[in-house]
Amino acid sequence: MLHVLDVRAIWLKEFASALARITPTLGWIPEISAVGALHSRERSDSLADPKLNIRRFPLQRGFARAPVSAALRPASKINRRLAAQSQEPSRAVLVCSSPHYADVAREWPGPSVYYVTDLFAAYGEKPARIEALDRRMCAAADLVCPNSKRIAEYLISIGCSETKIVVIPNATRAENVSDSPILSPDPLPEGAADLPRPVAGVIGNLAENIDWVLMSEVIGRTPWLSWLFVGPTDMRIADRTQRQARLAVMQSGRARFTGYRPYGSLRDYARAVDVAVLPYRKREPTYSGSSTRFYEHLAACRPIVSTRGFEELLSKEPLLRLVDGTAEMVDSLEHLRESGFKDGLEQRRCDQSRGETWEARARVMLDQIGKLSL
């Protein structure tokens, strides 16, 4: 039995669902509030896409801070909840997706795993505090699984034992991988079907991690190319220049924005574009993570052009083309135009993507858990 604490993010749901296809797995979602300590009721739920059994539970805001943790002992309460859903708690595996659950992992009677999907120290909380939580989580966990080499290096630098670490990158769904290479784009989905070919696609959260200044310049220099942006645009961009550039692109009439689309539908867009564009802006925590959108496009077999804003992608050539700046991106797109958006790497992308699925990632973790001497 595996408990994944917690699965609020879509990539965590995908990974937990992949684990559940191999071994019994329960995902946990905290409902954090200022009065969480006053509530005790749990709720069961079954997700359909991805398929996953989850339990929602109340949790006090600030549960990992010393005053709250000392007074209310929320880690012990969480452990009792997990144990109540385990036939043998000492044999059940706890997978923690946040360093804030360090005390939960320390008290858990069975094996525990720290599944690290972000450079948490680069978010809003004080980096020193997150680093302290990361140290405690790494000390408590029997296995530490960051999703990138760069996050692994960070964990080692703050004292995590290198012998505990196994890198498990992000991935795509197994059903997104075709039996044979996709040599030409599929029809565009409804809402974008009227776009004239060729079409460049940018898929994912359309916020801070996109270089909107670059996008504005590239779109202005490719009048022969349609642009399709698939993903939410409601997250605020702190940088004023980038924020204004996004607005300019959205109002330009040169690009189609679909808004949010369910994760399961992204495959249809990835397969439908002539070329995938990954215009990452080099900033944390993006630079240190693992690019889910790359694995989606890899399985779709279409040509991929990316900036150097993601460390993980710097070693992925020739599966994608890395560019520096507007001129190189425009040159790459024009070169692909001349070749009919066929770069001869479709078979290689198809072959590579077979090992880049959530199911493959789940097996790696389970194999490592099986090797633990407990």
Image: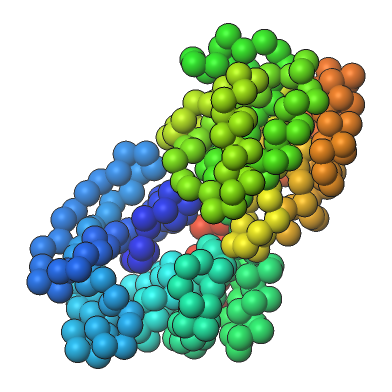
The image quadrant that residue 61 belongs to is bottom left
Q: Is residue 238 left or right of residue 328?
A: left
Residue 84 is at least partly visible in this image: no
Q: Is residue 101 above or below residue 311?
A: below
The image shows residue 328 at horizontal and vertical percentages of: 87, 38
Quadrant of residue 146 in the image? bottom right
Residue at image location 79% in from the left, 41% down from the top? 320
Q: Is residue 153 visible?
A: yes
Image quarter in which the C terminus is found: bottom left
Q: What percent of the width, then of the height, locates residue 235?
A: 46, 46
- Position of the N terminus, as image quadrant, is bottom left
Image side of residue 112 versus residue 276, left or right:
left
Residue shown at 33%/82% (left/top)?
65
Front one among 331 and 372:
331
- Rendered residue at 62%/12% (across/down): 195
Q: Locate residue 169, reporting x and y percent.
A: 61, 58
